[in-house]
Image: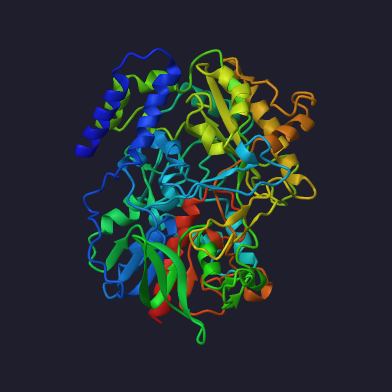
């Protein structure tokens, strides 16, 4: 209650002055929120301050990272009263402001984000600041679920069947569906009943607030031939309002879903501000027996009787492995790191790329008018009293479409290759203060394309490339554990240019949907201002769109593959189907880095299911 009052008073202070100019008003609101995240976080009463830490303490299991997979593991392993579990997190407890869905994008680039940028490479992001794309990665209890836009997507059944077919028994869709169901507490208007469950820790629900723009888009997509579906049900191809990771208007994240309910368990210790720098491994027996970490500027050690489990996420688990001597031999030797196991850690790294250039003008304000909504007291009364209203939307994301383009080479006709995320706002809606920074768009590009739209009614559709042919990778920058690794996204780099062609096919379909009667009722018109650097191409030609794609492109922050799962004899894998690091004992990786191929999904839902599956695998291992 005190936290809510504090937030409401802060809002009133921001809005009481009569300010001339919407830029200043919006700026005051957003800067207030961002400044709050720089102060001492608002603590949930179940999270007391950590005191009297014993640096020689022993535990049965040490879990590194409190994101989706790590939080599930901490919950499920501590169900066994005889097992003592330590969960180490580099960040701290997050402010409850992070649980307000509409503010999803505001916390990227704050202390809850590692704030990485990929290395500059030719062929993409020419219009990004310093030519580098932003790669957000969650830092705090809950990991990247602090930062997500809450779009709950499990993926297509074929994703998991492919996963199993390359040598990972137990990971087919039929194997994984029970784990999706186990976590879930679904309250949805449209759902295929046999594919959903109620009563789990993790809530999935419809947003109680829908704009007329979203309703028009969903209807227009159906007019264009996309059926209305439960995309987490029997068929993924089609259009739907977003199934949201929310409960009663608040974000469902890893902390409030899986950790908060069990925080008082005496056999579970959650320790924040503890950055793991390496796994302790006995070189003779190849057995992991603990971790080294930094807390309050000092080096500490924690010892594990049974297992060390890395759940530090798609970007950090591979870094910790390499710092521990597990990785490409030649690369580790370059930095003088003793090699314990020569494995292709970081040799592949995938992310879903998205394109922010599909912005449409409207002749009527049917989306979200951030200026009007943020200065209206009823916006906050609705949210805090009734858990309804604009603040319950997922940062403006309201609908999703999965489609198979006409150039897909996948033999299964039901397998999507593009996802469209419909937003009832655009980068101009917040006057360039938040969204522009997520994609790292340069001021010159913003001023040319989005600034003239400020205050105008718009909507945006983000095409997401689901199965990129382009493959990235990562390397250490040095042996210093505090030195960020080097991430090479390699967007749009495949030799056949298939990724660009698929994007363009998706762009054409978005245009076709926008031409449908339900969108034309509001005069939907694609913004046709030419992007700087592409003026020599005819607007709307394939060549123009390729130039635009290579100028401004961003990630969706779904990092997979750097600790690929599969049989050791494949030569490109790091862990086996039980998530054990090859040829090492008592060391597993449990997070999205083990996923061998990009999924037709957002990352969070698979990450929760991986945690659930891993917990059962570990229990079976120790109770044989």
Residue 321 vertical placement versus 534 (above, below): below
The quarter of the image holding the C terminus is bottom left
Please say which color scheme the image uses. rainbow
The quarter of the image holding the N terminus is top left
Residue 114 x, y percent position in the rendering = 47, 50
Residue 101 visible (yes or no): yes
Residue 103, picture quadrant? top left
Residue 593, picture quadrant? bottom right
Residue 557 x, y percent position in the rendering = 54, 47
Residue 457 vertical placement versus 387 (above, below): above
Residue 436 or 502: which is nearer the viewer?
A: 436
Residue 341, picture quadrant? bottom right
Residue 200 vertical placement versus 282 (above, below): above
Residue 492 x, y percent position in the rendering = 71, 45
Residue visible at 57% across and 37% down? Answer: 440
Residue 170 vertical placement versus 538 (above, below): below
**How many numbered discs, if any?**
0
- On the picture, is 50 further left or further right than 111? left
- On the picture, is 572 further left or further right than 602? right
Residue 200 visible (yes or no): no
């Amino acid at each position: 209650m005190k936290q809510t009052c504090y937030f409401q008073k802060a809002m009133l202070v921001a809005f009481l002055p009569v300010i001339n100019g919407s830029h200043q008003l919006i700026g005051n609101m957003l800067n207030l929120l961002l400044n709050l995240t720089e102060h001492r976080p608002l603590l949930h009463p179940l999270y007391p301050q950590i005191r009297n830490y014993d640096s020689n303490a022993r535990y049965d299991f040490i879990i590194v990272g409190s994101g989706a997979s790590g939080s599930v593991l901490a919950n499920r392993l501590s169900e066994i009263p005889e097992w003592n579990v330590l969960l180490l997190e580099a960040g701290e407890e997050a402010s409850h402001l992070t649980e307000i869905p509409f503010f999803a994008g505001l916390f990227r680039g704050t202390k809850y984000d590692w704030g990485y940028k990929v290395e500059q490479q030719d062929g993409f992001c020419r219009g990004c600041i310093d030519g580098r794309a932003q790669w957000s990665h969650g830092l705090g209890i809950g990991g990247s679920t602090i930062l997500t836009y809450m779009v709950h997507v499990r993926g297509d059944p074929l994703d998991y069947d492919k996963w199993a077919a390359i040598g990972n028994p137990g990971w087919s869709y039929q194997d994984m569906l029970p784990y999706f169901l186990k976590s879930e507490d679904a309250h949805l208007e449209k759902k295929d009943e046999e594919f959903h469950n109620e009563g789990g820790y993790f809530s999935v629900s419809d947003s109680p607030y829908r704009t007329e723009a979203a309703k028009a888009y969903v209807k227009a997509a159906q007019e264009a031939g996309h059926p209305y579906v439960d995309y987490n049900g029997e068929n993924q191809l089609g259009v739907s309002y977003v199934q949201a990771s929310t409960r009663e208007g608040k974000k469902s994240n890893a902390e409030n879903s899986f950790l908060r309910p069990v925080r008082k368990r005496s056999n579970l210790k959650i320790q924040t501000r503890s950055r793991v720098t390496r796994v302790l491994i006995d070189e003779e027996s190849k057995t992991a027996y603990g971790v080294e970490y930094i807390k309050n500027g000092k080096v500490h050690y924690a010892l594990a009787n049974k297992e060390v489990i890395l759940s530090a996420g798609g970007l950090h688990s591979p870094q910790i492995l390499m710092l521990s001597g597990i990785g490409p031999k030649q690369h580790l030797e370059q930095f003088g790191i003793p090699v314990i196991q020569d494995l292709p850690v970081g040799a592949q790294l995938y992310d879903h790329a998205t394109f922010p250039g599909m912005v449409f003008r409207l002749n009527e304000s049917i989306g979200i008018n951030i200026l009007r909504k943020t200065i209206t007291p009823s916006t906050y009364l609705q949210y805090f009293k009734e858990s309804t209203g604009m603040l319950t939307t997922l940062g403006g994301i309201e609908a999703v479409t999965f489609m198979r383009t006409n150039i897909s080479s996948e033999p299964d006709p039901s397998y999507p290759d593009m996802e469209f995320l419909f937003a009832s706002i655009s980068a101009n809606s917040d006057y360039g203060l938040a969204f522009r920074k997520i994609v790292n768009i340069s001021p010159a590009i913003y001023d040319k394309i989005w600034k003239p739209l400020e205050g105008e009614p718009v909507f945006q559709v983000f095409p997401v490339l689901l199965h990129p042919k382009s493959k990235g990778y990562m390397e250490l920058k040095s042996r210093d554990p505090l030195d960020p690794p080097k991430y090479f996204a390699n967007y749009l780099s495949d030799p056949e240019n298939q990724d660009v062609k698929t994007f363009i096919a998706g762009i054409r379909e978005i245009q076709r949907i926008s031409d449908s009667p339900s969108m034309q009722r509001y005069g939907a018109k694609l913004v046709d201002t030419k992007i700087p650097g592409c003026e020599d191409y005819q607007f709307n030609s394939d060549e123009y769109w390729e130039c635009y794609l290579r100028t401004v492109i961003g990630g969706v922050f779904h990092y997979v593959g750097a600790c690929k799962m599969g049989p050791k004899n494949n030569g490109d894998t790091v862990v086996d189907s039980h998530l054990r690091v090859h040829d090492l004992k008592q060391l597993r990786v449990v997070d999205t880095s083990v996923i061998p191929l990009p999924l037709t999904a957002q990352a969070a839902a698979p990450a929760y299911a991986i945690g659930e599956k891993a917990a059962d695998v570990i229990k079976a291992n120790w109770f044989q």
